[in-house]
Image: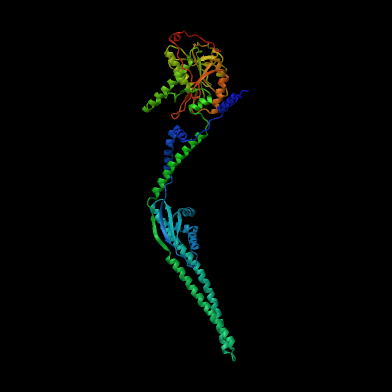
Amino acid sequence: MSPPPSNVSSDVDDEQESYERPRPTLVSLHFIGTALRRHLLLCMLAPVLGLLAAGMFMLAFPPPHAATASLVLTYDPLVEPTRAMATNISLLETQTLATRTITRLGLTTPPDDFLKSFTIEPTGSELLILTLAAPDDAEAVRRLEALTSVYLEFRSEQLSLQSNVLVDGLRERIEKLQGDVARMSKQIELLSAAVSPSASKLGDAIAQRASIQGRIETLQQSMEDATLRNSAVVESSRVLDPPTAEPGRAKRTTVLGLASGFVGGAAIVWGTVLFLAITSDRLRRRADVASALGVAVPVSVGRIAPLRKGWLWFPPLHAIDRRRADDRQRLAHAIEAELLLPQRRNRLAVAGVNNADEVSHAVVEAARSLAARGISVTIIDVTERGSRDLQVARSVSASPATPTVLRPRGLPALARGTADLLTVGHWDEGEESPSPELTGIALILADLDPAVGADHLTAWTDRVMVVVTAGRSSVEKARTISDQVRASGLEWRLAALLRTERTDDSSGTANFGRPAPISLLTEHERAEPTGRFEAR
């Protein structure tokens, strides 16, 4: 019987696929809380800034005060109620009414702006509520009183004009019919005075005159009714509730505006923070960094750069500076331990990824610690621009704990031996300086750039320790650097993480072989005389 097919190739493919595929972002309450805590200060200041912005807006544009009034507007019973109310509202929104009111008030406000200062709310078929805004309560009451007075006059004028047109038409009709009555009366007189009057013609004439007279009476009655209805509509339309200021309106507007600024500031900033956290591919957690680099990350510290002395006058900053010093010593101890591995060449490259200036503090701390124990260390700075902290280390007075700092003459990536090095602090490109004396133990400070690679580090060492800053490198960049370091043949046991977030509770060693415990040099090894070394 043939053996079952092997699944080794499929397992390798699955492992490779799982290594290359980025982990999906899981948006959970823990993820949201972590993203907000990452920018805790900004998230706490956002509502306050929104509140301040709303307050400044309120100062620049104070909330208007308002007054309200109720009007009873009767209408002709022959008119449909909805049409009557629509007419009343249309009259309130005319430019003529706004111009007359502005003139009476003595204002210089444009009619369009004045029309926007009040609102109309119809209630029922005859009741209308007006609300007018003004800079203060007294002015709001004054303007609304003028508006209601002018409106009632304007409406009465328009209704009377409409009624007068109807009455004038009826009067003209009556006058015409009265002329017909006069002609019929003359005709009847002529028929009655005839020698042989026709009874039928006389009767017809009398009947026609009576009909015309009846029509005249009907038109006269209609004219009187129209006049009475118009008078009733005008007289019964009035101000039901006089203009009064609305108490607390300005306060309510102010409170709502401030609340909107508070909530809006928080929503904008928190939403932006969450959006960037969800869409970002930056590495922040130890587990994600270890997965992208393909190596364990057992060392994780916070910020290690010391605070400037000018800032230490503020007492709370002393605690921050002490905490940074502790983290700096932790990373320096990890560098020492990796440098002094037994049966290893005592040369170690500490390579930073966009953080060489900060990593240099730990490198100097490790060199000084070793020097204080009697182990002389040379620091070779092969970063692109040169670390500022290493220059400061040589600017102070020489002491037994001051490390020797060297830097290549030209491009660091092209330096291949001690002839290319000069001591930092004695830099002169035009001076033919002799090769500096190098100790047998060296720390090489470098920065890793995917555009340069890691092959140039093999000229100085065969081991490397990579230091990544949380939130500064993408997944693709970390994987590219990992591939370049492995392709160069450098020995790479572990990596370190700077600025680790307090909310990061992941493991940087899960699924990776944790580096074996190491022991530092013995007393005999420490006392071994140092000598020069030749770079490869």
Q: Position of residue 56 (x, y in %)?
A: 42, 42
* Above-or-below relation of 105 to 483: below
Farthest-out residue, left? 315
| Residue 157 seen in the current view | yes
Q: Nearer the viewer, residue 406 or 477?
A: 477
| Residue 453 seen in the current view | no
Q: Position of residue 496 (x, y in %)?
A: 48, 22
Q: Nearer the viewer, residue 256 or 431?
A: 256
Farthest-out residue, front? 1
Q: Position of residue 392 (x, y in %)?
A: 45, 19
Q: Nearer the viewer, residue 458 or 261?
A: 458
Farthest-out residue, right? 2
Assign the C terminus to one quadrant of the image.
top right
Q: Quadrant of residue 40?
A: top left
Q: Residue at x 44, y 44 (%)?
A: 260
Assign the N terminus to one quadrant of the image.
top right
Q: Position of residue 449 (x, y in %)?
A: 55, 23
Tally of marks = 0
Colour pattern of the rendering: rainbow
Q: Quadrant of residue 41?
A: top left
* Above-or-below relation of 91 to 379: below
